[in-house]
Amino acid sequence: MSPRSLGPFTVSSIGLGCMNLSHAYGHPPDAPQAQAVLHAALDAGVTLFDTAALYGFGANEERIGPVLAPHRNRITLCSKGGMAGVAGDDGVLRRVIDGSPQALRRNCEDSLRRLGTEVIDLYYLHRWDKRVPIEESVGEMARLQQEGKIRALGLSEVSADTLRRAHAEHPIAALQSEYSLWSRNAELGTLAACQELGIAYVAFSPVGRAFLTGKLQEVGSLVKGDIRTAMPRFAPEAYARNLRLLAPMQTLADQVGCTLAQLAIAWVLHQGSHVIALPGTTRVDHLQEDVLGGALQLDANVLSALDALFKPEVIAGDRYAPQGQGEVDTEKYAFEKKG
């Protein structure tokens, strides 16, 4: 993997999204398996590790912190606040988006404690709380930086306009949003804005939440609690339509001499030198497969064929159900609201 710049850091072009190790995709792996994935990533040269206060309501940070602690000086550790588990009157933790200064400070300090570190290298606003001006949230994050609790600021799932407003308040090191062959909202403005402003674009779910690996052929196998069961493009009818794209993609992968996952990751990395791929996995063999995608060089013909095959208008289903779509600040969502 060739190194890429992310704010003040130089990181591997492929990072590891750690959410899968305790959250979101059904039954999480046990501690030994999660540790094996983290160690395999370190052995493979991954230097960017990403978690959040939300993942497992803090359990993810508690899981990865001790494993990564001995390697702290050679990795870039990222977490997120502004969306976390908050206990209601009944004591049950529920997901709450809160970008107020008080919440961000509390989230950050809780994350520092759970991770067992004195400083978080890159701290993201997980979701823009539209009740709070973006400048106010970013201003508090800047104060956390001044206090030495974080080293750089990031945003997640915001539009180009919001990104520019935030960057004017304080330099933003990275924007993290979903980006893959079948999720291409980045191309409506944020990808270009990041390049213009010198901001890294960290692309999560570069293999489309397993769709682009070709290994998830039947969505009926998804277990209760898997977040994909609520996503429109994973509904059976939409998914069946989307699966038709994989056969021609496989033909291209065969031409290149790689797997579908590797081709998907390589495509993401070819979208700009400021782009970093952030896949997640619970398996060592999948991680090793993903990392190899960072070494692929795709020629213009392959890139053009992939662009044509995965035109946004041919993808069946939205990324999120209406509630989730309303919580992100993407160009598509902003356009639909204005329309």
Image (cartoon, grey):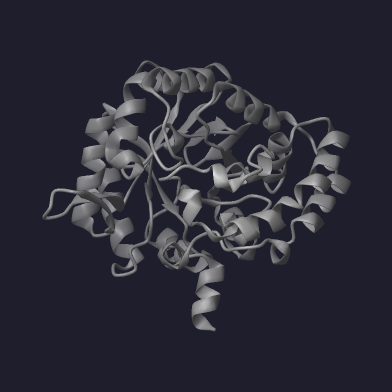
Q: Is residue 281 above or below residue 272?
A: above
In terms of image quadrants, where is residue 235? Answer: bottom right
- Left or right: residue 123 compared with residue 339: left
Residue at position x 45%, y 26% in the image:
75
Picture coordinates of residue 242, whole percent (x, y): 70, 55
Q: Nearer the viewer, residue 205 or 321?
A: 321
Residue most extreme to the left: 89
Callout count: 0
Residue at position x 66%, y 27% in the image:
289
- Left or right: residue 279 compared with residue 266: left
In terms of image quadrants, where is residue 96? Answer: bottom left
Picture coordinates of residue 79, whole percent (x, y): 37, 40
Picture coordinates of residue 195, whole percent (x, y): 61, 54
Residue at position x 66%, y 43% in the image:
217
Picture coordinates of residue 243, whole percent (x, y): 71, 51
Q: Is residue 250 above or below residue 87?
A: above
Q: Is residue 286 above or below residue 211?
A: above
- Left or right: residue 51 compared with residue 47: left
Q: Nearer the viewer, residue 235 or 131?
A: 235
Q: Quadrant of the C terminus?
A: bottom right
Q: Is residue 109 above or below residue 188?
A: above
